[in-house]
């Protein structure tokens, strides 16, 4: 197949590019580098199965030739990014989704939307099944991301129902691994970079809030299986093993061999207290579940940051 992946220079997008190429497909990547990095695609220089367009998908998209699939992964995805770029975040979730859906329709391509566990907001149901509608503040600072993704899901289902477009929606839970940006504001990269740099680990609130962390190769495998399946309704992909932020901080300190202090900061507005996917559907429909535990994944992530961080940082 020939596949378009938007956000191809991002953390997840670049790993997806690698997976589709490894499966023998041709890949067209697209990114405007608002949060993506050229370094994430540098290893593909000269690969005849990969081509790249530098483009903002919130504007009209043209891709020459046939496409069998469109995967829309373009968007700022960490709080520090979407709070810095609120309008582009809303645009890529609305206009970008509209443009990529229109392209898929014109090409007769299968479509996969990268949605997020943030559609559940600060959940009142735990763990979160796909049937849960969420508890989201539409006018809070996080609303620019949460509501952009909720809108993109609604538009994707409208194209499926009205135009008969074959669509897939993945709700991605916290993911980590190589190619994360050092200062992207995500908790795993924050802790690892701070520990390696000898800085205090920043915990918001008391650190009792929970997250569930999925290693990137597990997540990409789940997304690939979903794309190849016939499932239309939203599907959770994530690791259901839950950790408090304090537990994660202690594990990172242990594995880095650092005795840095922990610094507590005020809890951000609308920060979810818990986050854990119900992956019953992924297990039963896709035959998927994560295989890499947090300690193993963290070891690989720490090794990555040791290689890429400037010396002395």
Image: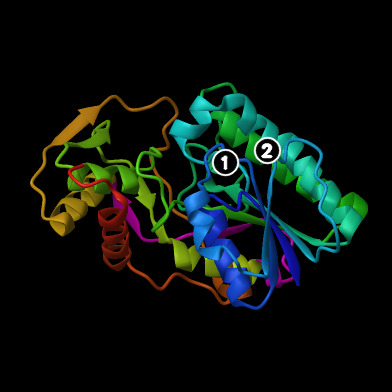
Q: Residue at x 59, y 63 (%)?
A: 17
Check disc 2: other Cα within 10 Å, few if <14, some if 14-19, many if 20+.
many
User: Nearest the camera: 259 or 245?
Assistant: 259
Q: Which residue is mark 1?
A: 33
User: Nearest the camera: 282 or 294?
Assistant: 294
Please provide percent x and percent y for residue 61: 80, 44
Q: Can residue 280 be seen at all in this image of the molecule? A: no
SS type, badge 1: loop
Q: Give above or below for 211 relative to 270.
A: below
Q: Is residue 236 magenta?
A: yes
Q: Give above or below for 259 relative to 294.
A: above
Q: Residue at x 91, y 50 (%)?
A: 162
Residue at the extreme front of the image, as rendered? 46
Magenta residues (range):
227-244
Is residue 7 found left or right of 37 in the rendered image?
right
Q: Which residue is mark 2?
A: 93
């Amino acid at each position: 197949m020939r596949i378009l992946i938007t956000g191809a220079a991002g953390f997840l997008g670049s790993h997806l590019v690698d997976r589709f190429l490894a499966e023998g497909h041709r890949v067209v990547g697209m990114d405007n580098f608002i949060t993506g990095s050229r370094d994430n695609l540098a290893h593909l220089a000269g690969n005849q199965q990969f081509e790249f367009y530098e483009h903002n998908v919130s504007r009209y998209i043209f891709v020459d030739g046939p496409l069998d699939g469109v995967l829309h992964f373009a968007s700022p995805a960490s709080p520090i990014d979407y709070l810095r770029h609120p309008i582009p975040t809303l645009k890529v979730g609305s206009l970008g989704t509209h443009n990529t859906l229109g392209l898929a329709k014109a090409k007769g391509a299968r479509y996969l939307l990268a949605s997020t566990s943030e559609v559940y907001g600060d959940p009142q149901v735990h763990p979160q099944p796909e049937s849960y509608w969420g508890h989201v503040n539409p006018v809070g600072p996080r609303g620019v991301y949460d509501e952009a993704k909720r809108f993109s899901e609604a538009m994707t289902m409208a194209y499926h129902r009205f135009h008969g477009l074959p669509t897939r929606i993945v709700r991605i839970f916290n993911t980590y691994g190589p190619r994360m940006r050092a200062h992207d504001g995500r908790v795993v990269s924050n802790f690892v970079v701070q520990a390696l740099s000898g800085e205090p680990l920043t915990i918001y609130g008391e650190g009792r809030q929970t997250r569930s962390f999925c290693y990137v190769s597990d997540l990409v495998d789940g997304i690939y299986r979903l794309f190849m399946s016939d499932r239309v309704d939203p599907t959770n992909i994530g690791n259901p093993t839950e950790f408090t932020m304090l537990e994660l901080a202690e594990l990172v300190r242990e594995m880095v061999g650092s005795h840095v202090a922990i610094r507590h900061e005020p809890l951000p507005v609308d920060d979810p207290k818990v986050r854990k996917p119900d992956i019953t559907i992924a297990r039963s429909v896709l035959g998927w579940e994560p295989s890499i535990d947090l300690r193993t994944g963290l070891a690989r992530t720490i090794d990555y940051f040791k290689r890429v961080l400037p010396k002395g940082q």
